[in-house]
Amino acid sequence: METVEIKSFSGQGYKALVSYGAWRAAVLRYLDEMQPNNIHRMERHTLTDEVFILTAGRASLLIGGNQPNLSEIEIISMKTGDFYNVKQNTWHAVLMSPDANIVIVENDDTSSENTEFHLLSNNHLQSLHRLAQEFYGNEKSI
């Protein structure tokens, strides 16, 4: 009987590593789409909260409220080791530095079937770029 299962992921993007019962743990690693100039949409999960834990690098959550349409975008700078529970139906996206690593815990059945996507309007894009500039200054990447 196996008592410990060790998994890791060093690629780019999202990779589910462990599933058990109703939950799964995954890793999110940097993609170019996670830079302020490349984010064009936000998502929300209709059946689950989603927990984000930064384990390396720098990252921020973009939060757009929990109404049917996006509200003002807020940037939350993540601290290594803190748990960020993005509540069900909350619009969100992630900004990450190239060396960032985030652990995600969510329902195992989270998929495109129970996730909604909202394209950012020109006003949201301008607001995001302004907020990112204020938040990160002249750094090319976070």
Image (tube, rainbow, N blue to C red):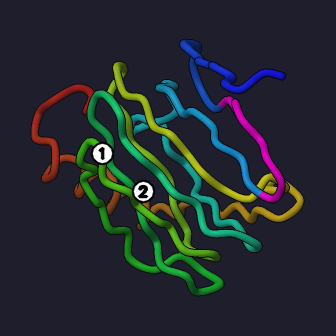
The answer to whether the residue labelled 2 contacts the one labelled 1, judged by CB atoms less than 8 Å apart, is no
Q: Is residue 20 highlighted in magenta?
A: yes
- x%, y% of residue 84? 40, 60
Which residue does the image show at 38% across and 55% down from the upper left? Answer: 61
Q: Nearer the viewer, mark 2 or mark 1?
A: 1
Residue 31 located within the stretch drawn in magenta? no
Residue 21 percent across, percent down from the top left: 83, 54
Q: Secondary structure at mark 1?
A: loop
Specify few, some or many for label 2: CA neighbours under 10 Å numbering under 14, 14-19, or 20 or more.
some
Taking depth in this image into account, of 132 and 5 the one nearest to the observer is: 5
On the question of residue 36 being in view, the answer is no
Q: Label the magenta part by its dominant secondary structure.
A: strand
Q: Which residues are magenta?
A: 15-22
Q: Quadrant of the C terminus?
A: top left
Q: Nearer the viewer, residue 10 or 40?
A: 10
* Residue 5 higher or lower than 116, as above or below: above
Sequence-first disc among 2 and 1: 1
Say whether residue 110 is left or right of residue 138: right
Residue located beneath label 1 in the image: 81
User: Crowding near pointer 1: few (<14 within 10 Å), some, many (20+)?
Assistant: few
Residue at image point 58% right, 60% down: 50
Q: Residue at x 74, y 73 (%)?
A: 46
Q: In this rendered view, identify the residue nearer to me: 110 or 1.
A: 1
| Residue type pointed to by label 2 | Leu
Residue 10: image location, x then y, percent: 54, 13
The residue wearing badge 2 is 125
Q: Which mark is residue 14?
A: none
Quarter of the image where one finds residue 136: top left
| Outermost residue toward the right in this view | 113
* Disc 2 to disc 1, C-alpha distance: 29 Å
Q: Secondary structure at mark 2?
A: helix
